[in-house]
Amino acid sequence: MSFENLGLSSSLLKAIEEQGYDKPSPIQEQVIPVVLQGKDVLASAQTGTGKTAGFTLPILEQFTENPHHNLKKRNIRALILTPTRELAAQIQENVINYSKHVDVRSTVIFGGVKQAAQVRALQKGVDILVATPGRLLDLHNQGEVKLNKIEVLVLDEADRMLDMGFHRDIQRIMNLIPSSRQTLLFSATFSTEIRRLASKFLTDPVTVEVAATNTTAERVNQSFYKVDKTSKAMAVIHLLEKWDEEQVLIFCRTKHGASRLSKRLEKKGISSAAIHGDKSQQQRIRALEGFKKGAIRVLVATDIAARGLDIPLLPYVINYEMPNVPADYVHRIGRTGRAGASGDAHSLVGQDETEYMLAIGKLLKKAIKAKVLEGFEPSDNPPKIPQHNKPSSNKPTRKPNGGGGFKKKRPAAGSGNSEQGGNRNARSGRQNTGEGKAKLSNNRRSNRR
């Protein structure tokens, strides 16, 4: 199968060739013809398999065949919703590359930066808008975005949007766009929540699933090492020295841990930058650009970078701290082994993280055996695992209350400064004060962007 067989115009084929694509990936091969037929799609595929091109190319083809009647006043015809700023920027970059030779305009909006430039781009008129839910609703409430002409809606990384608490925002956005639209829902996993969302917003969708749920790319070699927590930083430095000057993406569970490790690498003369939720958007953009251009050798990140980073020839990923949500492991190591290339994922497993490793093995349906990294053998006295560090399935713990119903269990105090947990902990001791409520409300709005 070639791209020529998929019904794409010569202008798009030229852009595809310039990107170095020779043949469509399985997800592209199955999705593009269905989207061109105007059908709704519920699609799942491994991360890094070309989902973005799978929905962008047919949208561009449709808009090229049926252009705006009045090109001086363009309305937003396609809306691509995505959970994170990094992923939104990555999708927009791809849309620009694919639309080089067609008369289709696009722009991206997300929080964390001033809105003036985004508003100016919208005022010029665009056909395709890539957005995160929070900033989209903010600009709509200000009258800067009109969604009444939407023909195609794309929900990308829908499972991540639900994990991040965007369900209500998605519902609000759905109420603002026409009901007679084409809807494309892309997700790395087909959870019960995703299927429920699809049944609510999609009409007779064609289901496309090119790989088993929660599988990892076949081209990624995975290694697990037992390492004492206190020895992890030196183990990372050992691996980096072993890999010469190759670029490496390192994942930490907490913002503080990411910053601390990055600073330690810098002191060892290894060019490094950290990216997490406490960094400003400009800092995150500079770090990503530096990493992509090769000016920064090591990028240390929390799970905000587990999706949205597309670096085609990234050779190595290190899990410095194991994720307590097993599915996050799939997305982390999916940053390597992309676009047909091979890659290596190395996980440093502390003695208090063994349960995380076993949970990942259960998810992947294969036995995982950790090796010993020479020179970093663990001690014989494993520490006890705190209750709040038990592996999570992303489902709230519930127990019967006095009325026979159920109530959610509150998170344990001091459960770390993880990307999603910090604001929950901020509630304690302030939730009954006006100042506390105002701060909590501001935090919620900020996180949605």
Image: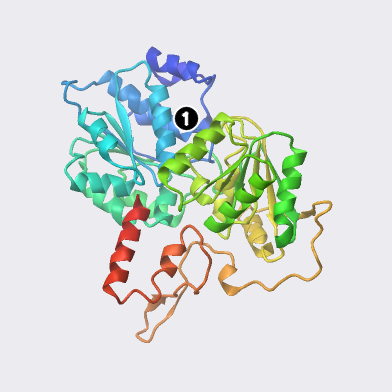
Residue at (28% x, 24% y) in the render: 63
Residue at (49% x, 45% y) in the render: 188
Q: How is the image coloured?
A: rainbow
Q: Secondary structure at mark 1?
A: helix
The one nearer the camera, 186 or 294, is 294
Residue at (40% x, 74% y) in the render: 428
188 lies left or right of 444: right
69 lies left or right of 199: left
Q: Position of residue 83 (x, y in %)?
A: 40, 47
Rendered view: 208 above or below 404: above
Q: Is residue 309 visible?
A: no
Rendered view: 26 above or below 174: above
Q: Which residue is mark 1?
A: 28
Q: Position of residue 76 (x, y in %)?
A: 23, 33
Q: Position of residue 137 (x, y in %)?
A: 25, 48
**For mark 1, does the 10 Å Cα neighbourhood hold few (<14), some (14 to 19), or many (20 or more) residues?**
many
